Structures are given as structure tokens and as C-alpha cells.
Image: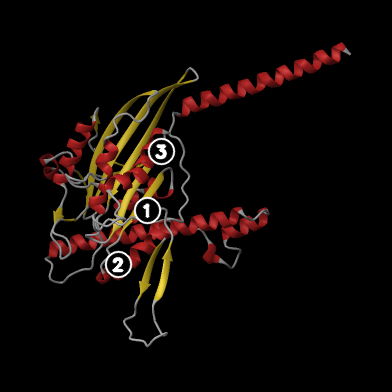
Amino acid sequence: MDKVQCLDGRHDGPGESREKVLEFGFDYCYWSVAPEEPHYASQEEVFQDLGVTVLAGASEGYNVCLFAYGQTGTGKTYTMMGTLDSMGLTPRICQVRKWSYNSVYRVLVSFLEIYNERVRDLLRGREQKKKPSLRVREHPEKGPYVQDLSQHVVSDYKQAVDLLEEGIANRITAATHIHDTSSRSHAIFTIQYTQAILEDNLPSEIVSKINLVDLAGSERADPHYCRDRLTEGSNINKSLVTLGIVISALAQNSQMSSSCQSINSVASHTSCLSGGGGGGGRRHCFIPYRDSVLTWLLKDSLGGNAKTIMIATVSPSSSSYNETLSTLRYAAHARNIVNKPRVNEDASVRLIRELREEIDRLKRTLLSFQMVLIVLDYY
């Protein structure tokens, strides 16, 4: 539970305080400002709470997404990537060499950034500068993807971290008033984990995708910035605003769906979905995924087939009060979204297993029927 005091700057007498307390409930709350503090949360503690959950979901065959959102300079990149002395979530997740001991597996990684609403491959080095930005497409079954994005097979931790460091070095950063090396793009590091398992003498393949997202920081426009820096900031804020709209719409739809499910009658259920005639405000919201490249790429992670974790980073400074309150409200909306993740197994294998289960059920039915015939014949 996190509390924020709303101060309006007025000077009131005793017993006439104008303070207002807002409460926000989240699953975890970390204090990572001063290591000497007794309640300081280390990178290892964050990994045990969140990173282990990501790995567990991937090993079970689910898509998983973890992204950090917050104001510039509040520690998003530190949390996701870390430093040489303190590894973040992304390298720690890569450090786990084998996630399932009962399978043969293959790991593919890719790394991209969204800069000025254009997609760049961070693992192509100098070749990327000579080529146009990559296009985003949408597969009818697998969802949005980046065409011609390079994927690299890794077999151990060192290979994965080398690619991660290469991508970070190619990422666009710049100095701002708040941070000397502020990220000027959204970065998505993707791990595709494929397991080949043998279950009940039936071969199966499960494909899981982990999206580890480091968002660019939101910030106010400064007239003293050059034109390129203003363009960057405008595009960053545009994508983050779109992300906020998408999250709010998804949260509203989730709340409407849960309220409709509590109504037993079919007529009432239909009325809730359609807005009850005159109640057009209760219609399900349209989700504007395509208004931004970021939300389009994260479409499945935000409101579809994925287990998603959002990390909201805030500054303890009183000068960042408005941004802190906005971030907490942002996260509170995201917490209301209900995804429906499913195991990503081969459709043919799933069909075979379901047919086998149906055959076993019919055999049991036939056996019980034969037993009834035997008893009747006896009498």
C-alpha cells in the first residue's frame, strides 16, 4: 500500500490541515533509493518476486510480458537492465540456463527499439543505419510482429548477455535536465523459448514468448531543447499517452465484463453489453492499439494471451509530485485489466490429446454398459 500526500501549499492553523491522503494498492512496493536504509530493496529481491514469476510462466508454456513505466530518471532502465555491479531483471532472467528439466529446448532472442514511431533492430549494428525502419505486420493467429527482425539462437548465458549488451550500446540515449543518459526510445528484448516434451508417450511442442520492455521516460517539453529533442519528446509522450488510453479502455472493459458475469439472466447480460438501450456510455470501449507502434506490438501482452507484469517507478522528490501521482494512477488502472493467457501448444497435439481423452471416456462408458448387461443377464 502506497500513500501520497496532496499538499496545496496553503498555511492553515492547528487542526485545519489541508492535507489529503490518497491510497494505492499494489502487489509489491519497493524502496530502492539508499542502500544503507534497512528497508532497501535490492535487485535480487525484485528478481525473486517478479523474475521468478516470469520464468515460471514461460516454463509452463505461457506468454509473459514485463514492462517498466515512469518518469525520466526514476530507475526504469536500472530495474530492467541494471549496471555492471547490480544486474537488472533482464540479465538475471537470461542467467537461467535451463528452465525445464523434462524437455529439449531452444532459445531465440531479439532486441528492438521504437524511436520516433519507427522500429530499429538493435542487433544489426551498423547495417541497421543503412536500411529503412522495419515494418510492423499482424499475423491472423500469432498477432503483431516485426517483419525482418533478426532472431539469434543462444545456448548459454554469455551469448544472451553479449547480445543484450550489444543492443544496449546501439540504443539511442541523450542528456536531459533530469538524466544524463536518458533513454530516447522504447526497447523490447524478446526471448522465445521453445520446449519439445514427451507427455504420456505423446510428443508435444510448447512455444513461450517473454517480452521485457524498457519504456522511455515521460517528461515535459522544454522550449530550450533543439528541434530533434522536441520531436523525440513529442513522439515519446504520444506513445505513452496512447498506452495510457489503451490501459484505461482495457481496464474499463474488464470491469464491465466482470459485472456482467455476475448477472444471471440472459436479458440482463445482453443489456449490459449493449448499454441497455439509452445507456450508451456502458458499451465496451474500442481499443486503439494501432494509434502507436508501441501499443500495436504489445497488443497481445496488454489485453490478450499473456501474463503481464507492470513496474511503476516513481521519484521520492517533492518536485516530481505531479508525475508521481500520474504514474500511480496509471498503474492502478493497469491493475484492473484481466488477461486470459493460455498455454501455447501445437493445435494438432492438443487435438490428439483431446481425442485420446474422448476415447478413454467412451471406453469407460462402454465398460459400465457391459457390466449392466451382465448383471441383467444374471437375474
Residue at the limit of the structure toward the right, as seen here = 379
Q: Which residue is mark 3?
A: 57
Q: Marks 1 and 2, Cα distance to the nearest angstrom?
A: 24 Å
The image shows residue 198 at horizontal and vertical percentages of: 44, 20
In the rendered view, tell whether residue 357 sits above or below residue 141: above
Residue 209, picture quadrant? top left
Graded by Cα atoms within 10 Å as few (under 14), some (14 to 19) or many (20 or more), the crowding at tag 2 reads some
- How was the colour assigned to the protein in this rendering? secondary structure
Helix, strand or loop at mark 1: helix
Graded by Cα atoms within 10 Å as few (under 14), some (14 to 19) or many (20 or more), the crowding at tag 1 reads some
Kind of residue at badge 1:
Tyr
In the rendered view, tell whether residue 237 sits above or below residue 289: below
| Residue at 68% across, 20% down | 364
The image shows residue 15 at horizontal and vertical percentages of: 42, 84
Helix, strand or loop at mark 2: helix
Q: Quadrant of the C terminus?
A: top right
The image shows residue 165 at horizontal and vertical percentages of: 17, 41
Helix, strand or loop at mark 3: helix
Q: Nearer the viewer, residue 44 or 324?
A: 44
Count every numbered label the image shows and give the total: 3
Residue at the limit of the structure toward the top, as seen here = 378
Mark sitting on residue 323? 2
Residue 241, picture quadrant? bottom left
Q: Which residue is mark 1?
A: 289
Q: Quadrant of the N terminus?
A: bottom left
| Residue at 83% across, 15% down | 375
Viewer-nearest of discs 1 and 3? 3
Q: Marks 2 and 3, Cα distance to the nearest angstrom?
A: 32 Å
Kind of residue at badge 2:
Glu
The image shows residue 251 at horizontal and vertical percentages of: 46, 57
The answer to whether residue 282 is left or right of residue 117 is right
| Residue at 11% across, 66% down | 226
